Image (tube, rainbow, N blue to C red):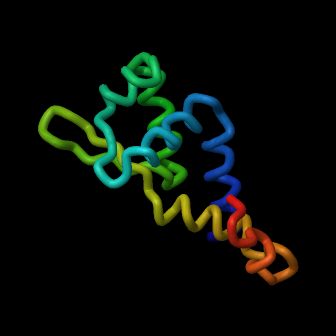
């Protein structure tokens, strides 16, 4: 991941509904959820949800798959993990073992 990719991903997450969508999808890895279930659980109208999913998809944080008449959304964990790795790459002066000592979350 480079700076441009990180900024795109972080910008996509910098909105309450989009952050909630990603967190909900992470809770439902690997199966994901249909667009309808996401809308129900987060009380988002279809046009609003569609807009947010497009933004998250463009950032590479969410993938969608057509399943008959339903669309299934999944968190793109490789991209999310790459973002986390990018943010913590130089953690603690290159000594990641001191960033998160055992027994601490």
Residue positioned 65% across, 33% down in the render: 15
The single residue placed furthest to the front in the displayed view is 103
Foreground of the two, 95 or 36: 95
| Residue 43 locus on image (x, y percent) | 45, 17
Residue appearing at x 48%, y 30% in the figure: 51
> Which quarter of the rendering shows the N terminus?
bottom right
What is the residue that sits farthest to the left in this orientation? 68
- Furthest toward the bottom, the residue is 94
Rendered position, 57 above or below 54: below
53 and 101: which is toward the camera: 101
**Going by the image, does 5 lie left or right of 49?**
right
Which residue is more in the foreground, 88 or 6?
A: 88
Residue 20: x %, y % from top left = 54, 34
* Image side of residue 34 versus residue 82, left or right: left
Quadrant in the picture for the C terminus: bottom right
Q: Residue at x 68, y 61 (%)?
A: 4
Q: Quadrant of residue 104?
A: bottom right
Residue 66 occupies quadrant: top left
Give percent across and percent down for residue 33: 32, 39
Give the answer, above or below, for where 53 lies relative to 8: above
Residue 7 picture location, percent across and down:
70, 55
Q: Residue at x 78, y 71 (%)?
A: 99
Location of residue 21 with respect to 31 vertically, above or below: above
Count of numbered labels shown in the rendering: 0
């Amino acid at each position: 991941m480079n700076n441009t990719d990180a900024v795109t991903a972080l910008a996509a997450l910098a909105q309450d509904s989009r952050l909630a969508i990603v967190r909900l999808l992470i809770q439902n890895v690997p199966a994901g959820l249909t667009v309808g279930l996401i809308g129900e659980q987060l009380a988002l109208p279809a046009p609003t949800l569609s807009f947010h999913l497009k933004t998250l998809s463009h950032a590479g944080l969410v993938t969608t798959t057509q399943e008959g008449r339903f669309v299934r959304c999944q968190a793109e964990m490789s991209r999310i993990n790459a973002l986390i790795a990018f943010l913590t790459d130089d953690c603690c002066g290159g000594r990641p073992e001191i960033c998160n000592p055992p027994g601490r979350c």
